[in-house]
């Protein structure tokens, strides 16, 4: 029941960059004999090594090769001093960067090669990749260094379309403090944008520390280039589950497996668009006092009011909140416009008790369907096998 979110700006496409090769011949100094000719010790010296630096389209590794010798050292540095680390093959004749070259970046390449007779020479060259016409950015949830409930997924919403989902997913590394099993899944966010969520197989264990390392700089999403990396981390808090029974018109707060609170509620009115969603929803945000307007969610029976203790459960506008105007129905009947309403007193204490990321397990006969994966965080409504199948690397 919030105003519709605005869309992000659209950027133009980026031309492909042709592969370029730069060849540098490295010549060691040759000692001269007294008569002006080569001395006997150096007359049969190995020829100088030939070094080739290959620069491909942004989004490909930088490669250095040597013929007639081996690579003693390779250093690739961008204009900001960032080092593009890499490794040399077992034969010592080829080096490749671990990371891809980023668009709109200048690089200096310093190569030291060694000939068969041990002579070393160093060369320097530079190159730059063109600026991208489209830059893809991300929005991460939950926030960095936050503490969240046991159902909170790690969620990434992309500004621009991601058509190369497998390439992007390969750059997303999740680590946990206790080896939690989980999987990425691709969904369409309620905004219409591409989104990747990492969900554990089961609810998180309290105290788990989660870290995301998204090495996206230089990766082409198909709809735009990434020009930076992302890091975030969060911690799992108390094990809380909110169980909502719309048929009994009751809400129960279960903490560490024990019911600590029950509250009489009124859910969505049966028989039409005002019905509530069922399944598992995740508390997305505690928004306090907000204005709710029926026009933003397509309901013809207009209302426009400020609502206290608002707790968002879906992007489509389902909340748990205070609804004193509906007091006659608490614990007796479902008579709301889709939200889970309760008294001011109960809403205030419940609002203080729950955390972003807590699951709301909602059941009831008169509902309008299950919360979809992209309408908030509905991934828990899929089986584990069905969720894993949504990974681009499955």
Image (cartoon, rainbow, N blue to C red):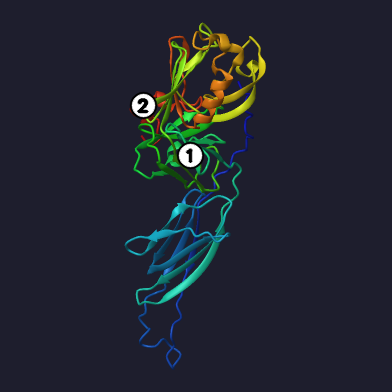
User: Residue lying farthest left?
Assistant: 90
Outermost residue, bottom side:
34
Task: Where is residue 150? Give x, y as percent.
Answer: 42, 33
Q: CA distance from mark 1 to mark 2?
A: 28 Å
Q: Which residue is mark 1?
A: 147
Lateral position of residue 288 relative to residue 248, left or right:
right
Query: Horizontal placement of 213 versus 10: left or right?
Result: left
Helix, strand or loop under label 2: helix
Secondary structure at numbered mark 1: strand
Residue 320 in view:
no
Quarter of the image with the C terminus is top left
Mark 1 and mark 2 residues within 8 Å of each other at the beta carbon = no
Tell me which residue sits at (49%, 48%) in the image: 59
Tell me which residue sits at (47%, 72%) in the image: 122
Residue 96 image point, x, y percent: 42, 57
- Which of the two residues, 177 or 99, is positioned nearer the viewer here? 177
| Residue 307 makes an appearance in the image | yes
Q: Residue at x 64, y 29 (%)?
A: 6
Residue at (60% x, 15% y) in the render: 324
Mark 1 is surrounded, within 10 Å at the Cα level, by few (under 14), some (14 to 19) or many (20 or more) other residues, namely many
Q: Earlier in the sequence, mark 1 or mark 2?
A: 1
In this view of the protein, which residue sits in the foreground, 135 or 130? 135
Residue 349: percent from left, percent from top: 53, 26
Between tags 1 and 2, which lies in front? 1
Q: Is residue 320 left or right of residue 28?
A: right
Q: Is residue 389 above or below residue 144?
A: above
Q: Quadrant of the N terminus?
A: top right
Check disc 2 and report the residue beneath it. 386
């Amino acid at each position: 029941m919030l105003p519709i979110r605005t869309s992000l700006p659209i950027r133009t496409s980026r031309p492909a960059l042709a592969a370029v090769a730069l060849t540098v011949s490295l010549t060691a100094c040759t000692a001269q004999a007294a008569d002006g000719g080569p001395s006997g010790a150096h007359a049969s010296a190995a020829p100088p090594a030939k070094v080739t630096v290959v620069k491909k389209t942004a989004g490909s590794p930088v490669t250095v090769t040597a013929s007639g010798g081996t690579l003693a050292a390779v250093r690739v540095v961008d204009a900001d001093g960032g080092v593009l680390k890499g490794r040399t093959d077992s034969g010592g004749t080829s080096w490749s960067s671990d990371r891809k070259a980023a668009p709109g970046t200048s690089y200096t390449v310093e190569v030291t090669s060694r000939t068969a007779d041990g002579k070393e020479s160093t060369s320097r060259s530079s190159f730059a990749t063109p600026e991208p016409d489209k830059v893809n950015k991300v929005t991460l949830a939950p926030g960095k260094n936050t503490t969240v409930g046991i159902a909170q997924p790690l969620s990434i919403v992309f500004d621009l379309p991601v058509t190369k989902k497998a390439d992007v997913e390969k750059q997303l590394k999740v680590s946990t403090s206790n080896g939690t099993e989980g999987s990425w899944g691709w969904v369409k966010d309620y905004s219409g944008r591409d989104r990747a969520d990492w969900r554990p197989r089961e609810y998180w264990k309290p105290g788990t520390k989660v870290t995301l390392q998204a090495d996206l700089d230089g990766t082409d999403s198909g709809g735009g280039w990434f020009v930076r990396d992302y890091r975030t981390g969060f911690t799992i808090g108390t094990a809380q589950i909110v169980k909502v029974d719309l048929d009994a018109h009751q809400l129960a707060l279960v903490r560490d497996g024990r019911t600590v609170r029950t509250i009489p509620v009124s859910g969505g009115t049966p028989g039409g668009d005002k019905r509530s969603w069922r399944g598992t929803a995740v508390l997305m945000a505690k928004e306090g006092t907000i204005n709710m307007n029926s026009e933003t969610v397509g309901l013809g029976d207009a209302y426009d009011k400020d609502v206290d203790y608002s707790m968002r459960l879906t992007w489509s506008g389902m909340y748990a909140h205070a609804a004193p105007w509906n007091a006659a129905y608490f614990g007796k009947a479902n008579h709301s416009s889709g939200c889970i309403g309760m008294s001011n007193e109960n809403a205030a204490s419940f609002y203080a008790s729950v955390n972003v990321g807590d699951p709301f397990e909602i059941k009831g006969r008169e509902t309008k369907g299950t919360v979809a994966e992209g309408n908030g965080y509905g991934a828990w409504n899929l089986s584990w096998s069905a969720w894993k199948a949504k990974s681009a690397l499955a």
